[in-house]
Image (cartoon, grey):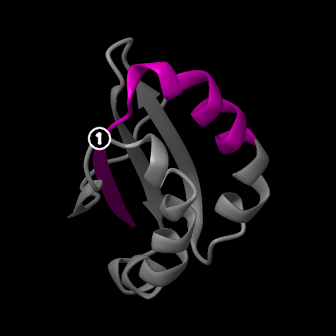
Amino acid sequence: MFVRVTHYKMKPESVPVMTEKLNELKPQIMALPGIHQFINTLNEDGSGCVVSVVESREISDANASAVAALWANFQDHLTAPPNAGGYDVIVNWSA
């Protein structure tokens, strides 16, 4: 398993529009190959991060162009391009 963590910053006034658009894109996001879980977090100031749990680093890397196309839907609402990093999953616990 592999986790991609993407930090981003939205214009605070764009948060409602972004949330609506995100919900519209859910089928496309969840249809990405190898995706197990998608978490999007957001603070009132527009800072947030996306955590995507994917089957492997290779699958996550292969999804890069599709993910970039999804982020393009938000380009007018971001203050800067998103910044992504990836990590191998060591443990994955849930209650």
Horizontal and vertical percent position of residue 2 = 35, 65
At a point 51% along the width and 63% down the height, the residue shown is 72
Q: Amino acid at mark 1?
A: Thr
Quickly name the residue at label 1.
Answer: 79
At a point 50% along the width and 39% down the height, the residue shown is 39
Q: Nearer the viewer, residue 25 or 87?
A: 25
Give neighbour class at mark 1: few <14, some 14-19, many 20+ (Cα, 10 Å): some
Which element type, helix, strand or loop, lies under badge 1?
A: loop
Question: Does the image show residue 95?
Answer: no
Question: Does the image show residue 80?
Answer: yes
66 to 82, vertically: above or below: below
Instruction: For the N terminus, give its image quadrant.
Output: bottom left
Q: Residue furthest front?
A: 76
User: In the image, is residue 14 part of the stretch drawn in magenta?
Assistant: yes
Rendered image quadrant of residue 56:
bottom left
At a point 49% along the width and 70% down the height, the residue shown is 67
Q: Nearer the viewer, residue 84 or 76?
A: 76
Bounds of the magenta span? Answer: 1-23
Horizontal and vertical percent position of residue 21 = 69, 42
Q: Nearer the viewer, residue 79 or 38?
A: 79
54 to 95, vertically: above or below: below
